[in-house]
Amino acid sequence: MNLNLLRVTAAAVVVGGALACSSDLTDPNAPFALSLEFNPSVDTLFMTDSVVSAPVHLTLSATSLGQPVQTPRGVEWTIADSTIATVDSTGGLRPVSLGTTTLTARVNSEKAHATIVVAQSVTHVLIAPNPVVGFVGDTVAIVASALDRNGALVPGTAYAFTVTDPTTVALSRTSTRTATAILLKAGTARIDVVADGKLGSSTVTIQTK
C-alpha cells in the first residue's frame, strides 16, 4: 500500500474513533476520574389515587479522585422498565405500576445505579396490641403496620413512635416497626405511630397488682 495512503487511512481511523468517543460524552467539562453515587441507593415510590404525582428526585453525589465535587450538569437519566416508573431529563421519577426497576445516571463513561421500588401508598396504620392493658412493671411488645388500601404491608416505610405520657409508659424502639413499652405506673396513656403521614394509636391502661 502506498505510504501516503496508509497515513491518510490511519488518520481517518483515529479521527473516526475520536468522534465516536466524543458522541458518548454527556459533559466534556466533567472532572477527571469522576465517580457517581445515589443516596439512597434504594428508594420507594408510592402509588396514589391522584392521576398526576409530583416527581421524586434522588440525590446524586459526585467525587473526583476521592474528593467531593459538584455534580456535573450533563447527566443522562434512564430507567430500566418504564412500565414501572418513568424518569424525565432532570431525574424526576414518577411511579407507573407496582414493581421494581433500576434508575441509571450517566456522565460520560461513569454510571450510578439505584433500585426503585413502586408500592402502594399508606392508607392507615395499625398498632398491636390495641388496647394495651397491663400491670405496673409489665413489658409489652408493640408492633406497627403501615397498610395500603388492600390491607397489604407497605415496604420501605419509616415509622415514628411517641407516647403521650412518658412518665406512665417508657417506650423504646427495637426495630423499624417495633417498640417495647414498659408500664411504669397506674394510669392511662396513648401510644401514637406515624407512617407516611398516617396516624395509628393504641390506648394504654395500667393497673396496680
Image: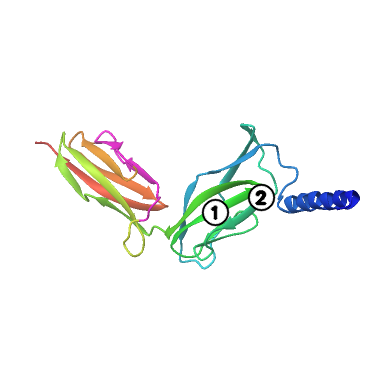
Q: Earlier in the sequence, mark 2 or mark 1?
A: 2
Is residue 97 toward the left or the right of residue 128 in the image? right
Is residue 48 toward the left or the right of residue 168 in the image? right
Asked if residue 35 is positioned above or below residue 10 in the image, the reply reads above
| Residue for point 50% across, 46% down | 41
Tell me the amino acid under the disc marked 2: Val
Q: How many labels, in total? A: 2
User: Of residues 183 and 164, which is closer to you in this image?
Assistant: 183
Within the image, what quadrant is residue 46 found in?
A: bottom left
User: Of residues 4 and 49, which is closer to you in this image?
Assistant: 4
Local packing at callout 2 (Cα closer than 10 Å; few below 14, some 14-19, many 20+) is: many
**Where does the image place residue 37, in percent across and percent down from the top left?**
56, 42
| Residue for point 34% across, 41% down | 162
Within the image, what quadrant is residue 66 found in?
A: top right
**Where does the image place residue 182, in percent across and percent down from the top left?**
22, 36
The residue carrying mark 2 is 75
Within the image, what quadrant is residue 34 found in?
A: top right
The residue carrying mark 1 is 103
- Please state the extent of the stretch shown in magenta in the rendering: 154-175
| Residue for point 70% across, 38% down | 31
Assess whether residue 160 is covered by the magenta stretch: yes
Q: Residue furthest front?
A: 1
| Residue for point 67% across, 39% down | 70
Asked if residue 60 is positioned above or below residue 155 in the image, the reply reads above
